[in-house]
Image (cartoon, rainbow, N blue to C red):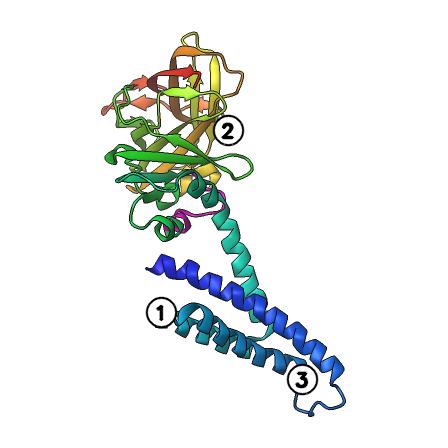
Amino acid sequence: MLYVSFFTYTAIIADLARRVKQSQDRATQVAATTAQSRPPSANPVGVGRLWAVVAAISIADQRTWRQSYWAIGVAVVVAAVVVFGGARVADAAAGLAEYTRQIRVPFRDISRAHPTFPNDTYLYFVHSPLTTVWDFEGLVFARYGRNPKVNGTDSGSPAEWRAHATTFVYYFDDSGKPIELLVEQNLAVRTMPTLPVRFAAPIALEQIEVVDSRLERGKALVAVLNWRAFDAVDRNYTIFAHLVDDQGNQIAQHDAQPWLGKAPTSTWERNRLYVDAIVLPISLDAPAAERLRLEIGLYDPATLQRVAIVDAPGAFLNDKVVVEPFSIVSK
C-alpha cells in the first residue's frame, strides 16, 4: 500500500500545487483591484494561503471523503504546510509532480503494451536511466497488483530470470525508451570454463544469465553477470563482452567498467555480490549467422592486458569465458 499511497498522494499534491498557483494569481488580481479598501493586515500572499486551505479542503471533498480518511489527513497536512510555506511549497510540489511524470514515462509504454500479465510474470529492468527499480515496483503494483514481480540491476540481487513462468527483460535505448525482450525459458547454451571461475586478480565470475541465444537485428544481446571480489582489488578493470563468429570476426561488443563506470572494481567490498548487466546492440544490417559465441572477461585499461582465468593452484586456464552458441535470426 505504500507504493499506491506515494503515487496517489503525489497526484493530490500536484493538483494542490496547481490550485495554489491559481489561487495566488487570483489573490494578486484581487489585491490589485481592491488596494484602496484592503485592510492594512491583508496581502496577496495571505489571501493566497487562505485560498490554499480552501483548495486542500476542496481536494479532500472531491477525491478522498469517498475513498479514505488517510487521504483526507494528507490533504489537510499539505494544506497546513502550504499555509506556512507559501509559493516555495507550491514550487516544490510542482517539481515533485514533474519528477513523477518523468519516471512514469517509461512505464507508460509497458502498460500500454500489456493491459494484463499472465500469472507468475517477472519484469527485470537493466540500467534504467531515470526510473529506479523501486519506482517501477511501485508503478507496477499500483497498476497490476502483486503480479508481476519486479527486479532490476539497481537492487543488486541475482536476476533469477528462469525462476518464473514468464520473464520480460527491459533495456533502454538512447532516448530512454524501454526495449522489451522475452526470456527463453529453455535456453540451450554452454559455458567454458564451467562457472564459477576465478581470475588472477581477486575476482570471481559466478554466474551468467542470458535472455536468449536467438538474437534479433535491431535489438540487443542482454546478459547479467554475477561478480564477487574475494579480496581487495587494487585497480579498476574493464569488463569486455564480445560477440564473434566462428572465424573470430566481431559482431557486437560491450567494453565498460562495472555498472557503466559507477562501480569500479577498486571500490568492491570483499565477498559482496555485484550484479552487472551487459547490452550488446545487434545492428540492423547484421548478416544472419549461426555458431556465434560470446566471449567475456576482464582487462586492465592502462595496458589492455587481459586478466587470466586460473585454476585453484593458480595455473592459467584461459583469458575469457565463452558462452555459445548464439545465432542472428529474422523475426
Q: What type is the residue that disc 3 sits on?
A: Asn
Q: Residues at badges 1 and 2 in contact (C-beta under 8 Å)?
A: no
Provide residue 177's location: percent of width, then percent of height. Answer: 51, 38
Q: Nearer the viewer, mark 1 or mark 3?
A: 1
Closer to the camera in the image, 328 or 248: 328
Quadrant assignment, res 38 = bottom right
Q: What type is the residue that disc 1 sits on?
A: Ser
Quadrant location of the C terminus?
A: top left
Q: What secondary structure is marked by label 1?
A: loop
Q: Residues at badges 1 and 3 in contact (C-beta under 8 Å)?
A: no
Residue drawn at x 43%, y 15% is 244
The numbered disc on residue 218 is: none
Quadrant location of the N terminus?
A: bottom left
Residue marked by disc 1: 68
First along the sequence among labels 1 and 2: 1
Q: What type is the residue that disc 2 sits on?
A: Ala
Q: Nearer the viewer, mark 3 or mark 2?
A: 3
Residue marked by disc 2: 302
Q: What secondary structure is marked by label 3?
A: loop
Instruction: Determine crowd level at label 1: few under 14, some 14-19, many 20+ residues with C-alpha closer than 10 A.
Output: few
Quadrant assignment, res 67 = bottom left
Residue marked by disc 3: 43
Q: What secondary structure is marked by label 2?
A: loop
Provide residue 18's location: percent of width, then percent of height. Answer: 58, 66
- Residue 207 forms part of the magenta stretch: no
Asked whether residue 59 appears in the rendered view, the answer is yes
Q: Is residue 308 left or right of residue 178?
A: left
Part of the protein shown in magenta:
126-137
Q: Nearer the viewer, mark 1 or mark 2?
A: 1
Above or below 285: residue 272: below
Q: Is residue 83 left or right of residue 137?
A: right
Provide residue 127's location: percent of width, then percent of height. Answer: 44, 39
